[in-house]
Image (cartoon, helix red, strand yellow):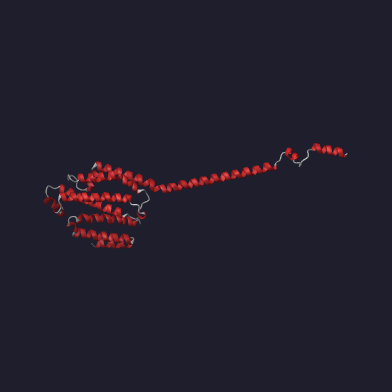
Amino acid sequence: VLLCAAGVGLVWFRLVPAVSGIVVGYFVLILAYSLALKRRPILDVIILAIGFVLRAVAGARAVEAEVSPWLIVCTFTLCMFLGFGKRRCELASFESTEEAGTHRLTLLRYSPELLNHLISVSAGIAIMTFLLYTMDRTPDYHPPFHKEYLLYTLPLVAYGLFRYAMLIEFGNRAGPTEIILKDVPLLLTSGLWGVIAVVIVLPTAGGSAGISVVRCLGTEAGGGRGKRQEARGKRQEARGKRQVGRVSPATQCDKGGWNPPYNQTLETADAI
């Protein structure tokens, strides 16, 4: 306890106040869970879900990033879905409720029907809040990419959640980590969703910079082309002026501005 208190005190002085407050709140929450709340059914899973949310929010605050409220709710309900799923998986791995109670005391208060209902509700809320997050157009919480395109990954999200709900019925896995890491269809679904998310995020996030570079290069190219055209126009204008000043002898003779040498010779002869 002293080491934890010293760690909290160090965090309080080294981190920004918002993150320090979240870390202290997380420490108090986990301490309360360890001492008493882990023996309370339903509340035990809710406390764990809140702990995951606090850790995610603390990370976002540490890098000074704004987090959408819908994303926070989605994370909370998804963690509840995974937590109730783990309780269902543990309950299915034992032959009787009494035997399950020796592993975890709260399993005595859970039933398969109750856990199935809680899993269904939390999965439905997680999907709805995910959709609300993707369609939220609030400027303060809009990331630098088109997150509305994540809406089209809904079939993968739904399949992943429903696949997990199906696997926990058998009780062949110890928990969410083992299910996610050892189930091939779930791994493929997660990998495909990750690839699509990267395809959505990277081009649109770098698109603004790319467009700016292209526009800058286009402006420079257009400016250089304009300068060349201007110089060419000046050269043509100067050439035209030289051509105007260089009048042919026939034209000067018509205007009386020049007498050829032959006429000068005749006038000289007549004078003599």
Image height of 69 relative to 247, above or below = below
- What residue is rendered at 51% in x and 47% in y? 220
Pinpoint residue 27: horizontal percent, then vertical percent.
25, 60
Image position of 169 (left or right of 74): left
Image position of 266 (left or right of 242): right
**Along the line of sight, the residue nearer the viewer: 164 or 59:** 164
Image position of 255 (left or right of 186): right
Residue 62 sits in quarter = bottom left
- What residue is rendered at 23% in x and 55% in y? 48
Residue 247 sits in quarter = top right
Q: Dividing the image into 4 quarters, which one contains the N terminus?
A: bottom left
**Along the line of sight, the residue nearer the viewer: 68 or 13:** 68
Pinpoint residue 98: horizontal percent, then vertical percent.
11, 51
- What residue is rendered at 24% in x and 63% in y? 2
- What residue is rendered at 17% in x and 49% in y? 90
Image position of 228 (left or right of 197): right
* Name of the residue lying farthest toward the right: 272
**Along the line of sight, the residue nearer the viewer: 213 or 72:** 72
